[in-house]
Image (tube, rainbow, N blue to C red):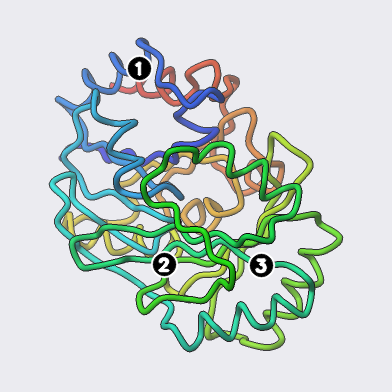
Amino acid sequence: MKPIYITDLDHTFLRTDQTISPFSRSVWNEKNHSAILSVATARSFQKSHDFLEALHLHAPMILLDGTMIVSPEKELIDIKLVNKALGDAVIDEGTKFGIFPFVIALKDMDLNEAFLFPTALNTHQHGVLENYRNDPRMVECTEIRAREMNLKIVYFGSYAVLKPLTDHMRQTFGKELEYKLSPEKYSDGWFLTILHPEGDKAHALKKVMEHLGRSLEDVTVFGDSVNDIGMFKLAGTSVAVSNALDEVKSVADIVLPHSNDEDAVAHYLARQN
């Protein structure tokens, strides 16, 4: 049977400038003849497709932190949504801390997305939005509210604000939601991602392996951040790049000597028979 490799994108397979090197592209496309390759990313279908258009990809993709599993042909395999009432309740609780989130939602079942952002932005949110100029999904909201089909609610800010916000959300909503607090590795900001309780990469990895008819022991996963930890604990082999967070390295089976900017994943794949 073909080995299975699933990699995170940002800060793992992608370089820091959000490019894929010719070396990584060549190794991926060559390995695709003898292995099953896919991605598990916080990015959307369109953003992932844009990055991966030069790569051969035939396996389901784990997208938006695990809230959605989609084939390369845009066939929906699984989706985990936060409903409007619960999404609005989350937003209302956040206002008590003086912060408003980004909301990533589906506009329709053709998987067209909306990226809602508040008019009232903090410094960290301003910085994030610089990466989304001219993105057709963007919708500015004077009063931000959830939509009918919400994929994730994301707060960006300082640790001093987001840590008590995370604790408050857990105390308020408990197991109704999943909460992931993590540093933004290339700035001094933090982000809190709020998801359906089964909308993370770990649950999505199980679904992908069921779809492929394979055991979790058969998959090797690559990552660098907090949202990869659940996936690392399930996979047969988990591999952290050298620039991964310490808490990710601590649960990895293998820590690579190379970073994402040194084509870590491609170097590993090139060594596999």
Instruction: Give me the residue at 70% from left, 75% from top.
Output: 94
Q: Position of residue 266 (x, y in %)?
A: 40, 21
Please give left or right for residue 196 compared with residue 246 in the image.
Answer: left
Q: Earlier in the sequence, mark 3 or mark 1?
A: 3
Vertical arrangement, residue 255 with respect to residue 149, above or below: above
Instruction: Give me the residue at 38% from left, 74% from top.
Output: 81
Q: Secondary structure at mark 2?
A: strand
Q: Secondary structure at mark 3?
A: loop
- What residue did someone put label 3 on? 100
- What residue did someone put label 2 on? 151
Q: Quick check: marks 3 and 1 in contact, CB under 8 Å?
A: no
Q: How far apart are the alpha carbons under marks 1 and 2?
A: 35 Å
- What residue did someone put label 1 on? 270
Vertical arrangement, residue 99 with respect to residue 250, above or below: below
Amino acid type of disc 3?
Phe
Q: How far apart are the alpha carbons under marks 3 and 1?
A: 44 Å
Amino acid type of disc 1?
Ala
